[in-house]
Image (cartoon, rainbow, N blue to C red):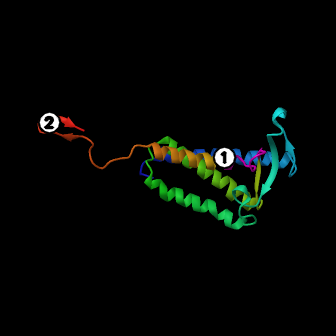
Amino acid sequence: MRKGNLSGWLVILGTATIVVVLDQLTKRWIEGNLAIGESLAPFPELANFFTISHFTNTGAAFGLFRGQSILLAIIPVVVVVAIVVYIRQLPMNNILIQFSLGLQLGGAIGNNLFDRIRLGHVTDFIYFHFWPAFNIADIAIVSGTILLALVLLTMPEESDETDVVEGEAGEQRA
C-alpha cells in the first residue's frame, strides 16, 4: 500500500472485521441451535428449495481436500501475505478495491483460520438444495474476488505518457 493511505487500510481491516464477526456469530448460532444435519425453513413455501441447515465440512469449497484441516488452516496466512504484497500493485485510492480486499481477507480468516483451528472443520448452513451449503465467509470470499476482478477489468489503464500532445501553434491534439 502506498504511504499515507491509512484510510485504505481502515476500509480493508474494518470490512474484514465485520465479515469475521458476522461469520462467527452466525456459525455459533447454528451450532447452538441446530444439530448437525438438522434444518429449518425460514420461508416455509421455499423449503424444498432453500433451508438453513447445519453441516460441517472438513474440506475446502464443495468438500474438496476433506480431512486436510492443517493444510487448509495455512491458506489464510498465505492470503494475508498475498494481500499485503499485492496491495502495493493496486490503485488504493479506489474504495471498491479496498472493500473487495477486506471481504476476501475477512472470509479467509473466518472460514479457514478460526474454524479449522477451533473445530477442525467449517460450519456451513446456507443451503440451496441444488448447490453445496456455504456460509458468510464463503459469500465474502467469492463476492470480494468477483468485485476485485470487475473493478480491475473495467478500470481505465494508467499511462506513463501524456494522452495529449501539443501541436506547433500550442493547440492540443489527441
Tell whether position 91 is magenta: no
Residue closest to the far front: 130
Indicate the position of residue 39 as horizontal and vertical percent values: 85, 44
Q: Earlier in the sequence, mark 2 or mark 1?
A: 1
- Which dot marks residue 83? none
Indicate the position of residue 89 as horizontal and vertical percent values: 43, 54
Residue 51's image quarter? top right
Residue depicted at 21% across the width and 37% down the height:
173
Looking at the image, residue 28 lies above or below residue 73: above
Residue depicted at 64% across the width and 54% down the height:
108
> Which image quarter holds the C terminus?
top left
Q: Depth check: 52 or 114 in front? A: 52
Tell whether position 138 is magenta: yes
Give amino acid for label 2. Answer: Gly
Left or right, 48 with respect to 102, comes to: right
Left or right, 160 with respect to 15, comes to: left
Indicate the position of residue 16 as horizontal and vertical percent values: 61, 48
Residue 45 appears in the rendering: yes
Q: Which residue is mark 1?
A: 139
Looking at the image, residue 145 lies above or below residue 57: above
Question: Which segment did they paint magenta?
Answer: 126-139
Give amino acid for label 1. Answer: Ile
Q: Secondary structure at mark 1?
A: helix
Query: What whole-number distance in Å separates the C-alpha atoms at marks 2 and 1?
Result: 54 Å
Label 1: how many Cα within 10 Å (few below 14, some 14–19, many 20+): some
Left or right, 65 with respect to 105, comes to: right
Label 2: how many Cα within 10 Å (few below 14, some 14–19, many 20+): few
Q: Which residue is mark 2?
A: 170
Residue depicted at 87% across the width and 47% down the height:
38
